[in-house]
Amino acid sequence: MKSKRARATDISQKTKQEVWERDGGHCIICGSPVAMPNAHYIPRSAGGLGVPENIVTLCTNFSENKCHYRFDFGSRAEREEIGGKIEKYLKSKYPDWDPEKLVYRKYDF
């Protein structure tokens, strides 16, 4: 049985569908259609929730740019550049976007 934190950071099928539609089925960084709506802006390891305000569509390792891989494992400069673009994108979609509200807190649920 999963913990409350694990359930809160998982991305549901409903959320994946909502994010896929919001992002037009393409990587929000490079526009590649070889993408999936499964990238946490605030990582699961830091308690990042599996909610649309924290999830974006990024291209996979099967694409030329590998944006999701570079966001997770790239150089510090790559991670900061992609992270900045993701933050700007999410702010454009959610005017009240606040990263502080996207982290699991034991007593919020």
Image: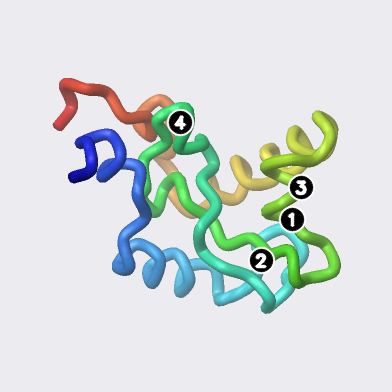
**Considering the image in quadrants, where does the C terminus appear?**
top left
- Please state if 13 lies on the left or on the right of 28 as rendered: left
Cβ atoms at labels 3 and 1 below 8 Å apart: yes
Amino acid type of the residue tagged 1 in the rendering: Cys
- Please state if 27 lies on the left or on the right of 11 as rendered: right
Cβ atoms at labels 4 and 1 below 8 Å apart: no
Q: Which badge, 4 or 1, is on the more N-terminal residue?
A: 1
Q: In the rendering, at what x and y percent does residue 106 appear?
A: 21, 22
Amino acid type of the residue tagged 3 in the rendering: Arg
Q: Which badge, 3 or 2, is on the more N-terminal residue?
A: 2
In front of the other: 66 or 100:
66
Amino acid type of the residue tagged 2 in the rendering: Cys
Give me the C-alpha separation between circle 4 and circle 1. Answer: 21 Å
Q: In the rendering, at what x and y percent does residue 43 appear?
A: 51, 37
Q: Which badge, 1 or 2, is on the more N-terminal residue?
A: 2
Circle 1 crowding by C-alpha within 10 Å: few under 14, some 14–19, many from 20:
many
Q: Write down the residue under mark 4.
A: 99
Q: Write down the residue under mark 3.
A: 70
Callout 3 secondary element: helix
Q: Write down the residue under mark 2.
A: 27
Amino acid type of the residue tagged 4 in the rendering: Pro
Q: Write down the residue under mark 1.
A: 67
Give me the C-alpha separation between circle 3 and circle 2. Answer: 13 Å
Give me the C-alpha separation between circle 3 and circle 4. Answer: 21 Å
Q: Which badge, 3 or 4, is on the more N-terminal residue?
A: 3
- Please state if 51 lies on the left or on the right of 1 as rendered: right
- Residue drawn at x 63%, y 70% as measured from the top left: 35
